């Protein structure tokens, strides 16, 4: 945190004070292929396509996969199919990407 900002600094005045945060991107000690990046982006985008829907619905609809196949894929990664995308951690998305080889969906859509 860089600095607190009083609620009196704003107009109209909010009910809470604020803070200025400095966000430093995490550096990774590994590199990923462009193919992995494309798959990862497609899977994450599909998961968040409709944020209030369950993962099984978003992934099956966006990736044109059967619900059964998506359910099996999620359970294989210890993810409850009824979860929502925002409840997953980055490592969960990475694991889904790593185990997506057998799903046969296109990364070019």
Image: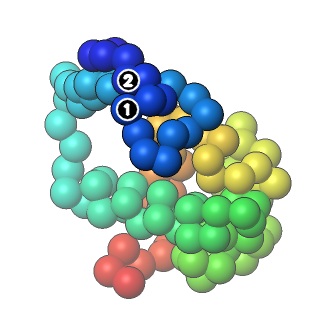
Task: Identify the secondary structure beneath mark 2.
Answer: strand
75 over 55 or under it: above or below: above
Rendered image: mark on residue 53: none
Task: Decide which of 76, 50 is in the foreground and name it.
Answer: 50
Q: Residue at x 38, y 17 (%)?
A: 4
**Residue 109 appears in the figure:** yes
Query: Which residue lies under the disc numbered 1?
Result: 9
Query: Around disc 1, counting alpha carbons within 10 Å, would you say few (fewer than 14), some (14 to 19), or many (20 or more)?
Result: few
**Residue 70 appears in the figure:** no
Query: Which residue lies under the disc numbered 2?
Result: 5
93 over 64 or under it: above or below: above
Query: Quarter holding the N terminus?
Result: top left
Task: Identify the secondary structure beneath mark 1.
Answer: helix
Task: Decide which of 106, 19 is in the foreground and name it.
Answer: 19
Q: For this view, does 22 lie left or right of residue 78?
A: left
Real-space CA distance between mark 2 and mark 1, rounded to the nearest whole angstrom: 7 Å
Q: For this view, does 42 lie left or right of residue 85?
A: left
The colour scheme is rainbow
Where does residue 98 sit, x and y in percent of width and height?
A: 45, 47
The quadrant where residue 32 appears: top left
Query: Around disc 2, counting alpha carbons within 10 Å, would you say few (fewer than 14), some (14 to 19), or many (20 or more)?
Result: few
Total marks drawn?
A: 2
Q: For this view, does 39 lie left or right of residue 53?
A: left
Where does residue 85 sit, x and y in percent of width and height?
A: 63, 52
Where does residue 22 sit, x and y in percent of width and height?
A: 26, 24
18 over 35 or under it: above or below: above
């Amino acid at each position: 945190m860089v600095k607190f900002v009083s609620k009196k600094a704003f107009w109209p005045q909010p009910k809470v004070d604020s803070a200025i945060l400095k966000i430093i991107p995490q550096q990774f000690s590994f590199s990923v292929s462009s193919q992995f990046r494309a798959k990862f982006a497609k899977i994450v985008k599909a998961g968040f396509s409709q944020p209030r829907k369950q993962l099984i619905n978003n992934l099956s609809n966006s990736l044109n996969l059967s619900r059964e196949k998506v359910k099996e894929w999620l359970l294989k990664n210890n993810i409850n199919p009824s979860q929502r995308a925002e409840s997953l951690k980055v490592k969960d998305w990475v694991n889904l990407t790593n185990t997506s080889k057998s799903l046969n969906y296109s990364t070019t859509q």
